[in-house]
């Protein structure tokens, strides 16, 4: 029995966005308990040429909603990247999870061989649906989730691998 595009994408995106949501709760509580201005974490980055925490979360949401939207034929919400607070980022995650909840297996599986074309700066990238999901969308999604986690851990938030990996429900 083979695994479907839906089974690869939707549960993985959902699991890690829910984990990211829980980590953001911990970050907000951390700031409140230690009297840290949340902006200090929201704007922090691991290296000067990398995105800050805020943009890492936005990007993780974008890769999840846009890839599932493209593959499942859904119109994901358009965000203007104006989130300023932890609550704003949690709302964006919730809206992304809502897109994932609307996805169904059939159109995603049908998209496995369909050509997907995306703009990446001035370039156009072309993939089959399967290549797009496996070799572009998922790696980028995990990169942004892991980097958000790394920023918060670097700033002293007491989170570990279990927070990032979060167990899937039975």
Image (tube, rainbow, N blue to C red):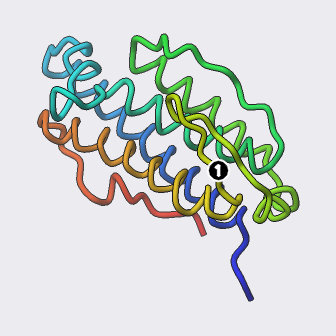
Image-based side of 134 in relation to 150, left or right: right
Quadrant location of the N terminus? Answer: bottom right
Q: Which quadrant of the figure has residue 65?
A: top right
> Which quarter of the rendering shows the C terminus?
bottom right
Residue drawn at (47%, 23%) of the image = 89
SS of the residue under disc 1: strand
Residue appearing at x 48%, y 51% in the figure: 16
Relative placement, left or right, of 52 versus 112 is left
| Foreground of the two, 159 or 134 | 134
The tally of labels here is: 1
Q: Which residue is mark 1?
A: 126
- How busy is the neighbourhood of tag 1: few (under 14 within 10 Å), some, or many (20 plus)? few
From the viewer's perspective, is residue 118 above or below residue 128? above
Residue drawn at x 78%, y 65% is: 113
Q: Residue furthest bottom?
A: 1
| 99 is higher (above) or lower (below) than 38 | below
- Residue located at (49% from left, 27% from top): 90
Query: Outermost residue, front direction?
Result: 123
Image-quadrant location for residue 76 = top right
- x%, y% of residue 103? 79, 49
Question: Where is residue 38 shown, x and y percent of the image?
Answer: 26, 16
- Taking the image as shown, residue 82 lies to the left or right of residue 130, namely left
Across and down, in percent, residue 8 comes to 63, 65
Frontmost residue, 14 versus 120: 120
**Of 30 and 21, the residue lying toward us:** 21
- For residue 148, above or below residue 164: above
List x then y, in percent, for residue 58: 47, 28
């Amino acid at each position: 029995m083979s695994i479907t595009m839906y089974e690869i994408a939707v549960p993985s995106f959902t699991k890690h966005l829910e984990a990211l949501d829980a980590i953001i709760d911990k970050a907000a509580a951390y700031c409140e308990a230690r009297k840290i201005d949340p902006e200090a974490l929201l704007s922090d980055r691991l290296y000067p040429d990398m995105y800050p925490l805020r943009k890492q979360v936005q990007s993780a949401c974008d890769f999840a909603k846009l890839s599932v939207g493209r593959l499942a034929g859904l119109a994901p919400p358009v965000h203007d990247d104006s989130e300023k607070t932890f609550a704003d980022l949690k709302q964006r995650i919730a809206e992304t999870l809502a897109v994932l909840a609307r996805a169904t297996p059939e159109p995603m599986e049908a998209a496995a061989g369909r050509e997907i074309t995306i703009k990446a700066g001035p370039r156009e990238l072309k993939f089959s649906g399967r290549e797009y999901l496996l070799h572009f969308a998922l790696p980028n999604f995990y990169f942004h989730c892991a980097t958000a986690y790394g920023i918060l851990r670097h700033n002293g938030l007491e989170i570990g691998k279990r927070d990032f990996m979060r167990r899937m429900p039975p």
